[in-house]
Image (spheres, rainbow, N blue to C red):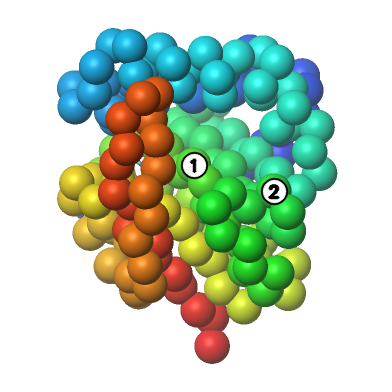
């Protein structure tokens, strides 16, 4: 059975571990070690995660299948949104399923959870930015009727990358 745990500071160690693991598994092959560690040391430390977890406009969820941790979700609302500010929208900043649990429908259930939360918050859409070469995730979003609305540049460590901004409206 699937369940979601809304994270608090008590989850920081679990969150740090799964965040680093999924980040390295997803981007490690295509990026330099230096860029990977610059990101980890700026965004996934105890200090950085404490700041994110105590920001009431950032919502973290751990997803469990029975007792197994399968992934996590980070949503941003209001001023916690990165790059783009849309009062009527919710940003999916991170949606990660652990490698060994991918392609079994868990990502879909996590996305459905994000949609449910955005609707509960009375927002009209969800948006996200995805690396232009992350074809698997882009197919996943297309399947879920996200449309590309613009492109952005983001910096990983020292290197600029192009991200596709994709949005899904509920009406
Ligand atoms: C993207 C991600 C969240 C999808 O989760 P998942 O559990 O693997 O996906 P699901 O099994 O729920 O797939 C749902 C549908 O999305 C599509 N899909 C998912 N992954 C896909 C892939 N790699 N290639 C093509 N289509 C894909 C399929 O149509 C699938 O439906 P189907 O199984 O009926 O064919 C997951 O693969 C992941 O965590 N990837 C690494 C991290 C990442 O890239 N996150 C996104 C950053 S923006």
Mark nearer the N terminus (2 vs 1): 2
- Image quadrant in which you'd find residue 144: bottom left
Foreground: disc 2 or disc 1: 2
Residue 166 horizontal side relative to residue 61, left or right: left
The quadrant of the image that shows the C terminus is: bottom right
Query: In the rendered view, would you say 2 is above or below 108?
Result: above
Q: Secondary structure at mark 2?
A: helix
- Image quadrant in which you'd find residue 14: top right
Total numbered circles: 2
Residue assigned mark 2:
80
Q: Residue at x 28, y 67 (%)?
A: 142
Q: Residue at x 54, y 53 (%)?
A: 83
Q: Is mark 1 within 8 Å of ligand 1?
A: yes
Q: Is mark 2 within 8 Å of ligand 1?
A: no
Visible residue check, residue 63: no
Residue assigned mark 1:
94
- The residue carrying pointer 2 sits among few (fewer than 14), some (14 to 19) or many (20 or more) residues within 10 Å by Cα, namely some
Q: CA distance from mark 2 to mark 1?
A: 13 Å
Q: Secondary structure at mark 1?
A: strand
Residue 85 horizontal/vertical position (percent): 63, 62
Q: Front-most of 21 and 42?
A: 42
Visible residue check, residue 78: yes
Are the residues tagged 2 and 1 within 8 Å (C-beta)?
Answer: no
């Amino acid at each position: 059975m699937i369940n979601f745990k809304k994270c608090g500071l008590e989850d920081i160690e679990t969150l740090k571990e799964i965040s680093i693991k999924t980040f390295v598994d997803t981007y490690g092959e295509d990026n330099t070690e230096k860029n990977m560690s610059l990101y980890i040391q700026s965004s996934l430390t105890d200090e950085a995660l404490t700041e994110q977890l105590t920001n009431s406009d950032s919502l973290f969820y751990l997803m469990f299948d029975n007792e197994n941790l399968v992934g996590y979700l980070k949503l941003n609302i209001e001023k916690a949104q990165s790059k783009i500010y849309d009062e009527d929208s919710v940003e999916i900043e991170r949606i990660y399923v652990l490698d060994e649990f991918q392609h079994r429908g868990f990502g879909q259930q996590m996305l459905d959870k994000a949609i449910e939360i955005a609707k509960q918050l009375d927002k009209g859409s969800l948006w996200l930015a995805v690396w232009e070469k992350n074809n698997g995730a882009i197919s996943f979003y297309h399947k879920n009727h996200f449309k590309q609305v613009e492109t952005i540049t983001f910096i990983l460590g020292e290197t600029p990358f192009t991200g596709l901004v994709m949005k899904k409206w509920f009406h």
